Image (cartoon, rainbow, N blue to C red):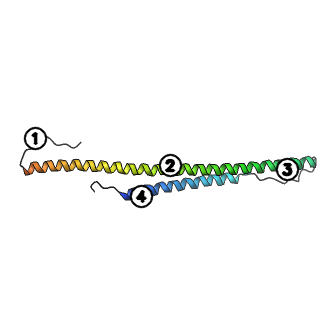
Amino acid sequence: KKGGKDKKGTKDNTDNALNVMNLILDKLQNGVDLAAQHIIEPEDNENNENENEEEQVEFRQLQNDIIRDENERLKMRLTRLSTILSYYLQDVNDRHINLMEKLDKWIGLRIDSENSAIDSLVNHIQKSIENESELNFRLILE
C-alpha cells in the first residue's frame, strides 16, 4: 500500500504494552503478597514457667509491641513501594506508547518519501518514452 499507516499495528503495539504493564503489576502484587506472608506474628508464650514470670511477661509484651510496630512499618513500606512502582510503570508505558506513535509517523514519512521518489522516476521515464527521447544516464534509486 502506498504511503498509508497501519492503524492496526499501532493498536497491537498499545495492546502489547498494556499486557506487559498488567503482567508487571501482577508480579509486583505477588511480591508484595509474598512479603506480607512472611510477617512474624506476636506470640503468647506460657511455656517458660521456670524463669522469673514477671520479667518474662514484661519481655514478651515488649517483644510483641516491637513485632507489631515493625509489621506496620513493613506494610507501609510495601504499600509505598507498590504505589511508586505503579506510577513508574505507568510513566514507562506512556513513554512507550508515545515512542511507538513517533516511530509510526517516521515510518509513514519514510514510505511517503520513497513513493515520491519512485513516482518521480516513473514520470521521468514515461515522458522520455512519450517524447521518444533517449535516456542519457543510468537511473538509480538510492
Amino acid carrying mark 1 in the image: Asn
Q: Mark 2 — residue? A: 92
Q: Is residue 139 above or below residue 11?
A: above
- Residue 90 in picture, x, y percent from top left: 52, 52
| Classed neighbour count for the residue bearing mark 3: other residues with Cα under 10 Å, few (<14), some (14–19), many (≥20) | some
Give yes or no for contact between labels 3 and 2 (Cβ–Cβ under 8 Å): no
> What is the C-alpha distance between the residues marked 3 and 2?
46 Å
Q: Mark 3 — residue? A: 61
Q: Mark 1 — residue? A: 136
Tag on residue 11? 4
Residue shown at 41% from the left, 58% from the top? 11
Residue shown at 58% from the left, 49% from the top? 85
- Earlier sequence position, callout 4 versus callout 1: 4
> What is the C-alpha distance between the residues marked 4 and 3?
59 Å
> What is the C-alpha distance between the residues marked 3 and 1?
100 Å
> What is the C-alpha distance between the residues marked 4 and 1?
48 Å
Give yes or no for contact between labels 4 and 3 (Cβ–Cβ under 8 Å): no
Q: Quadrant of the C terminus?
A: top left
Report helix, strand or loop for mark 3: helix
Report helix, strand or loop for mark 1: loop
In this image, 75 relative to 115: left or right?
right
> What is the C-alpha distance between the residues marked 1 and 2?
55 Å
Report helix, strand or loop for mark 4: helix
